[in-house]
Image: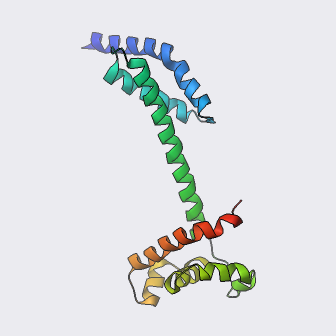
Amino acid sequence: MEGLLQKQTKDFSEILAEYESMIYHLIHKLNIQDRDGEFYQQGLIALWESYQKFYGRDSFPKITYITIRSRLIDLIRKKSRLIEHETISEFFQEEAVNDSNIENFDPLFWDMVKNALTEKQWVYVQKRIIQGRGIKEIAYEEGTTTDAVKGWGKEVKRKLKPVLKPYLI
C-alpha cells in the first residue's frame, strides 16, 4: 500500500513537472492576477483530480486542459459573484445617514428611485437604507413578516440595479 502511494506521488510529481506550465499558461491566457496563488492552487487541484480520473488515456492532455480551464473560470465567476454581493451588501447595510431630509440632497435622484419602485419597496428604501432600521423592526411597523420585507429588499436591488448603473463608478 505504501509503495503504491509513493508511486502515485512520484507519478504525480512527474505529471506536475510536465503540466505545471499549462496551469501558468491558462492563468496568463485568462488574464488572471494571482497575487495570492489561489488560482494556481485551484489549477493544481484540477490537475490532481484529472490525474486521478483520467491518467493513462490518450485524451489525458485535452481533458486536463479543459478541467483546469473550467476550474479557473469557475473561480473567476465565484469571486465575481462574491464581489458583486459584497458591494450590494455594503450598499444596503452601511450605516444610515440619520438625516430625515435626505431627499433634499438630490431630489431628482430620489424621485427617480421612488418612481422605479412600488409603495412597499419605497418603504423599504426609506426605513432600511435611509433610516437604517432593522428588517424585524420594519416588519413589525408594517404589520408583515420579515420574509416579506426581505422580498421587498430583493426586488429593490433588482429594480435599482439598472437605474443606479449610471451613478456607479
Q: Residue at x 55, y 49 (%)?
A: 80
Q: Is residue 151 above or below residue 118?
A: above
Residue in the image at 44% along x and 74% along y: 150
Identify which residue, 133 or 149, lies in the foreground: 149
Q: Position of residue 97 (x, y in %)?
A: 67, 78
Q: In this view of the protein, which residue sits in the foreground, 27 or 13?
A: 27
Q: Quadrant of the N terminus?
A: top left
Q: x, y (%) of residue 110?
A: 67, 81
Measured as percent of width and height from the top left, residue 46 is found at: 43, 29
- On the image, which quarter does residue 90 sit in? bottom right
User: What residue is at 48 percent from the left and 84 percent from the top?
Assistant: 138
Q: Residue furthest right?
A: 105
21 sits to left or right of 13: right
Is residue 45 visible to the viewer in this orientation of the structure? no
117 or 12: nearer the viewer: 117
Image x and y of residue 53, in percent:
31, 24
Q: Is residue 103 above or below residue 38?
A: below
Q: Nearer the viewer, residue 60 or 51?
A: 60
Query: Looking at the image, which residue is at 55% across and 64% down?
Result: 89
- Where residue 61 sits, quadrant-wise, is top left
